[in-house]
Image: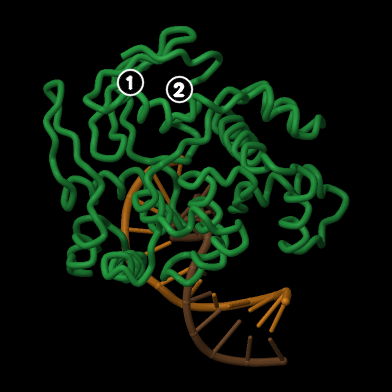
Chain colours: A green, B brown, C orange
Amino acid sequence: MVLNAGDFRLDHTLESGQVFHWQKLGDAAYAGMIGPWPVLVWQERRRLLAQSPAPREQVRRYFALDHKPAEIHATLPDDEFLRPAIAFCGNLRILRQPHWECLAAFITSSMKQVAHISGINGALRRRYGQPREFAQRTFHTFPEPAVLAEAAEGDLREHCRLGWRAPTLKATAEVIARKKFRLASLRKKSYDDAHKALLKLPGVGPKVANCVLLFAYERLDAFPIDVWIERVLRETYFRDNPDASTAELRQFAHTYFGPNAGYAQQYLFHYWRSKKAEE
DNA sequence: TTCCAGGCCCATG
DNA sequence: CATGGGCATGGA
């Protein structure tokens, strides 16, 4: 299928640390899954090409091709720190990921480098997910909550290298599987209520909750603050205020960046990490 | 070898 | 409420 993508950039979108299971094939093609559907996807100028049994509208929705960068940028401040980040990757999109797999992925993300998170995600899929053959390749779905709820903690540690994240991932999978917590119900809640609800899940703190709201629920005002973003904020906007608390950083981010703060966060995150990698 | 990674949890003040 | 230590694992 061929999708009109405008100035969309597939590589920045898939390699900016918001999703962890897409594999790069050769030059510019990626293999991954959109929910239950295997997908091969690549880009030719302003067109996104995909080979997949997925309905076209699902692909469009996942990649958020309906988001309009120009309109988003217009809501963001124009300053010396954000400007180069937007120039670098202002054409990435914040995905609409399936709720559970995004939540589970970020539970496994704490104190892990992006490459490690990808490794863990692949291991979880291969060991517990369902294989799907497509285009001479084997894809794996992300395992359902009930499957991870039944997994042995030792097995999660040994085969997926989860360490101390194993019990929290399993515990949250159990809560979801037993329907003590409905991920779909978060959609109609306010940002504050949804964030507060997520904090009740094992392994979910303020940062993971914000990642889930941003990358799975399209709450574009969510502003996850991880070690990178905290460092960036302190080296830029807070350069003259070294004793600012993390609460002040959080307050600043929401008021300064506004309703699309999540996009600003993702531009800053990806730009600074890419810049650092070049050094 | 030592340091650090898209943090969370729990025990203290 | 805010602060601090501990926590597995693996790559640089």
* Residue at x-position 58% and y-position 22%: A91
Dot 2 amino acid type: Leu
Q: Which mark is residue A41?
A: 1
Which residue is at the front of the view, A115 or A277? A115
Residue sitting at 34 percent across and 49 percent down? A101
Q: What label sits on residue A10 in the rendered view?
A: 2
Disc 2 to disc 1: CB gap under 8 Å: yes
**Left or right, A127 with reference to A9:** left
Residue A149 pos. (x, y %): 23, 66
Q: A29 or B5, which is in the foreground?
A: A29
- How crowded pointer 2 is (Cα within 10 Å; few <14, some 14-19, many 20+) is rated as many
Badge 2 marks a residue whose secondary structure is helix
Q: Quadrant of residue A60?
A: top left
Decide if residue A241 is on the left or right side of residue A213. Answer: right
Q: Which chain carries label 2?
A: A
Judge left or right: residue A204 versus residue A57: right
Picture quarter with the N terminus of chain A: top left
